[in-house]
Image (cartoon, rainbow, N blue to C red):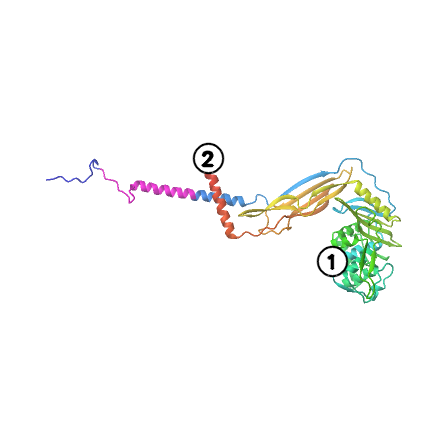
Amino acid sequence: MKKIYTESRGSKGRHRPKVSVSGVPEFMFKGYRKLVVLFLAAVLLLFGISCMLTAAGSSMNTAVAHSESRMKAPAGPKPDPPGLWADAAILTDAESGRTLYEKNAHVKLPMASTTKMMTALVVRDQLDLDDEVTVSPGAAAVGEQTVGLVAGEKLSVEDLLWSVLVLSANDASTALAESTAGSVESFVNLMNKKAESVGAVESHFVNPHGLDQSGHYSTAYDLALMGRELLEDPVLARMVAARSHNIPGPPGQPERTLVSHNEILGVFDGANGIKTGYTGKAGWCLVASATREEKSLISVVLNSSHRADDTTALMNYGFSQTVRVAFVDKGQKVGRSRVSAFPRRYVNVVGQKDMGALTLKGSGDVFRVRIVYSKQAPPKVEKGSAMGTVESWLNDGKLERGKVVAARSVDRTGPIRGAFAFLWYSLCWMGKIISAPFRIF
């Protein structure tokens, strides 16, 4: 009988391994699957780590950045201050507001028509330039320096402001006061509130024109504050710099020509304002301003028999004996702030305006400047929006505060774009991790 073999030749009793469909032995197929699973698990783990690193990179270590610097006045002999005829005087740096010279600067004195600086400031707060004003009989009857207003005449606020600041017209001041607040008394209340808001707390007003009246007074220091506030308004600054201007005359009459009483306009180099004044009690008064290159000065002289000479002496002292110390320039980059993490977008943080201060040579002044801004910006940023502050100190006393702003506008990032950016950054992290061993050698 023929023998039947059940095993393959050479197997010697062992079972033949099973073969997979692909021709790969089953034990090898199982090992391959394990490798694939392990590989996918490693990729997922690596991707998870990359996502965590990406997310961690989006967080800010600190929300605020700050820098601080110190600057000193140049060494040398301290200059002698000028001699003046005025009973009270002050010289200030228009940019920083600091006092460079003073004489009885906080003594309360009548200030005549320098009052009209505050009148103009209040009117600008309350009325538009093209608003129409009807002159009342009371306003037309106000005496001394006038532009010749006629009862019932109608003029614009702008024309009346020109009359107030160039010609120093008392009738125009009264007409504006009545139109602004309904009565002179109510307008005076607004004047005193405005004075307090700008820091002129040593002043008190009882009329809008400055004619001598009990309880109507100011100080050289306060008037310098008002002058600085007025120069911040480009409309008023243009008016006080004018030597003359024309406005309409009464119906059927020719134009009125307004001529400034400010003796230093057109005479002193760089003079650009501000307001004169004279009454029997106040004497000759002048709040003046001048600019040369990077220096801007405001001077005040009260009850001076030689107000133009006193002003010239103060201005020459200020321009020749000072040095400007720059804190930050307009548009100067001080840092950057992140607008979004996915994708990473930043906006430069820059100075909003030129900021600095004048210091007298040999004064020993020490300035300290601190710039603070947010390193994390809002999701949407408008150009010029505030991002932080610039603070300055003079000899450890607070001097000036300004802003640093966004240099450009940045729109909000959409969620889809943000998600794709996150995935891309995570894949980049994966690439860095995988390539790290090869970059060592």
In the rendered image, residue 206, in percent from the top left (x then y), is placed at 82, 58
Residue 63 sits in which quadrant?
A: top right
- Please give the residue where the numbered disc 2 appears in the rendered image: 438
Can residue 228 be seen here? The reply is yes
Q: Is residue 436 left or right of residue 170?
A: left
Dot 2 lies on which element?
A: helix
Dot 1 lies on which element?
A: helix
Q: Is residue 304 left or right of residue 68?
A: right
Residue 125 sits in which quadrant?
A: bottom right
Residue at x 42% of width, y 42% of height: 42
Q: Which of 26 and 196 is in front in this view?
A: 26
CA–CA distance between discs 1 and 2?
70 Å
Q: Of the residues shown, which amino acid type is indicated by label 2?
A: Phe
Disc sitting over residue 125 in the figure: 1
Q: In this view, does 28 lie to the left or right of 61?
A: left
In the rendered image, residue 43, in percent from the top left (x then y), is placed at 42, 43
Q: Residue furthest top?
A: 441
